[in-house]
Image: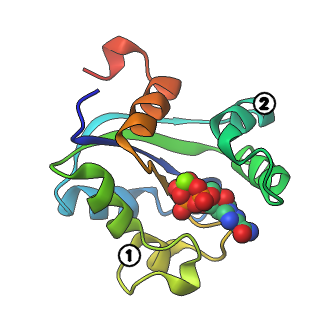
Amino acid sequence: MASNRTFTMIKPDAVANGHIGAILDKITKSGFKIIALKQTSLSAEKAGEFYAVHKERGFYNDLVAFMSSGPIVAAILEKDNAIDDFRKLIGATDPTKAEPGTIRNLFAKSIDANAIHGSDSDENAEIEGNFFFSAFERI
Ligand code: RTP
Ligand code: MG
């Protein structure tokens, strides 16, 4: 995957609260092109695999339970400087610390149910995009 791509997931809280449309609208209006998009669900096993990097952290079990609690929307996005610009657009992990107008400021309720995921590096964007989409789905 080119380095101008990132990967995102609209998390179960934002899907359940009916925010898919508003979040995708904000993403595209911020200059990101949608390369791939699907609604799906994560089993606890798959959620654990996706967040394996956090395995030793105290919040890991809660994170896995939350991420497998309902449907999510996965997407690959493209824009110059995609990783950094998207992390800015979603805001801080803790929504009480997220800048006004960011996706987490607008749609997240807590640090656990924080509405959206954004990749933290080019390498992880590629790994995460490949986790959800086959080669012909992410051209
Ligand atoms: P994400 O990976 O979901 O985009 O979130 P992030 O980079 O902003 O935060 P990260 O450190 O990767 O943590 C992944 C998710 O775990 C939950 N978390 N809880 N209770 C806590 O201290 C804590 N820290 C992290 C959050 O839901 C976070 O999005
Ligand atoms: Mg992260």
Numbered circle sitting on residue 102: 1
Quadrant in the picture for the C terminus: top left
Q: Residues within 10 Å of mark 1 (few under 14, many from 20)?
A: some
Residue 15 visible from this viewpoint:
no
Q: Position of residue 27 (x, y in %)?
A: 29, 58
- Which residue is denoted by mark 2 in the rendering? 45
| Left or right placement of residue 14 versus residue 81 in this view | right
Residue at x 59%, y 76% (from the top left corner)? 94
Q: How many numbered marks have been drawn onto this rendered protein structure? A: 2
Which amino acid type is marked by label 1? Thr
Colouring scheme applied when the structure was drawn:
rainbow
Asked if disc 2 is less than 8 Å from ligand 1, the answer is no
User: Which element carries disc 2, helix, strand or loop?
Assistant: helix
Q: Position of residue 87 (x, y in %)?
A: 38, 62
Q: Residues within 10 Å of mark 2 (few under 14, many from 20)?
A: few
User: Which element carries disc 1, helix, strand or loop?
Assistant: loop
Considering only vertical position in the picture, is 65 above or below 44? Answer: below
Which of these two is toward me, 138 or 69? 138
| Left or right placement of residue 78 versus residue 38 in this view | left
Which amino acid type is marked by label 2? Glu
Residue at x 45%, y 24% (from the top left corner)? 130
Q: CA distance from mark 1 to mark 2?
A: 30 Å
Dot 1 or dot 2, earlier in sequence: 2
Considering only vertical position in the picture, is 72 above or below 62? Answer: above
Q: Position of residue 92 (x, y in %)?
A: 49, 73
Quadrant in the picture for the N terminus: top left
Residue at x 35%, y 81% (from the top left corner)? 101
Residue at x 83%, y 59% (from the top left corner)? 58
Asked if disc 1 is less than 8 Å from ligand 1, the answer is no
